[in-house]
Amino acid sequence: MEHCMEIDTEDAFPEFTLAEILEMERMFKEKGVKTFDQEFCEEVAAKFSSSPYRTGISVIAWEQVKTWFTNKQSGLEEKATLLSLISTTNATRCVQRRPKKIVSSIRKLASQYASEKYENPIGERAAELSDLAFEALSAKDLAWYDVATFLNYRVTYSGDLEVRVRFSGFRNDQDEWVSVRKGVRARSIPLAHSECEKVEPGDLVLCFRENEVYAYALYCDAHIVEIERREHDISGCTCIFLVRYDFDNFEDKVESHKICCRPTKRKD
């Protein structure tokens, strides 16, 4: 897939979270060249490093902040030159297609994917991204993995927001660009033994799939087809769930410990 508008550098400094990148975008827009000052960069680095969202993540040095702003400015200059050259060859149909609308929608799109039911202001939601638990869909095997952090973001030709994802337990060479709209969502919740009665046929679930075709087991989307309700024993739920995997319509009977429920489907 080709992209016409990419925000920030690719992965020069993957230490920054998505919320921090959004904040630096705002600072750069409001303060311009002042963002290159060492004192300003030191303040930003100290603010990010002391944030509760950065618990368990490495601290940020002021040099990293300054380099980000410098690369941001260089990137804008390079893009301006490129757009000027493209314009002279009448090839701007995609690049100049509603650019203001695309840029202005970045914050809205970035915050909306956290949860359909979030009622906080858009700015607050964007700042809270690093404090939420997400899972993302890998294009390599169409399985869902927990997100360790969001590294960067960009906008496609169609205006779709994509985020650079680092999956929990995987190295940086396994990072992927993932569509926010199609492949990022709140983390699924393991089905508790006491809540199996809340699961109904037709529900979307995340199911642990074991198959000789795969070298390892995967968590894949599936829908509940039938449920064989059984009386629970001392070990917990003994019900059997017939699921149909969305990827290939394969049906399998699984126990409750292999099922995770979607937060939006859980009932009080």
Image: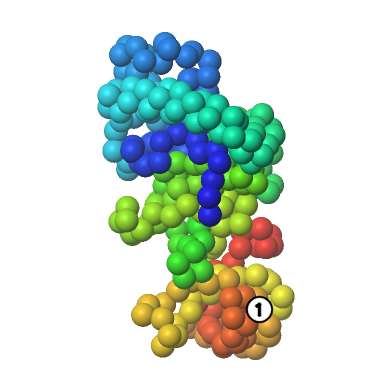
Question: Is residue 34 in view from this perspective?
Answer: yes
Residue at position x 54%, y 45% in the image: 3
Q: Nearer the viewer, residue 80 or 221?
A: 80
**Side of 83 where 73 appears, left or right:** left
Expressed as whole percent of the image width and height from the top left, the position of residue 130 reads 47, 41
Give the residue furthest to the front. 89
The residue that disc 1 covers is 224
Question: For residue 260, which quarter of the picture?
Answer: bottom right
Question: Is residue 191 in view from this perspective?
Answer: no
Expressed as whole percent of the image width and height from the top left, the position of residue 264 reads 66, 58
Expressed as whole percent of the image width and height from the top left, the position of residue 35 reads 41, 16
Residue at position x 65%, y 62% in the image: 266
Q: Is residue 154 above or below residue 192?
A: above
Question: For residue 198, which quarter of the picture?
Answer: bottom right
Residue at position x 43%, y 12% in the image: 33
Residue at position x 48%, y 20% in the image: 28
Mark 1: few/some/many CA within 10 Å (<14, 14-19, 20+)? many
Q: Is residue 153 above or below residue 185?
A: above
Q: Amino acid at mark 1?
A: Ile
Q: Nearer the viewer, residue 245 or 192?
A: 245
* SS assignment at label 1: strand
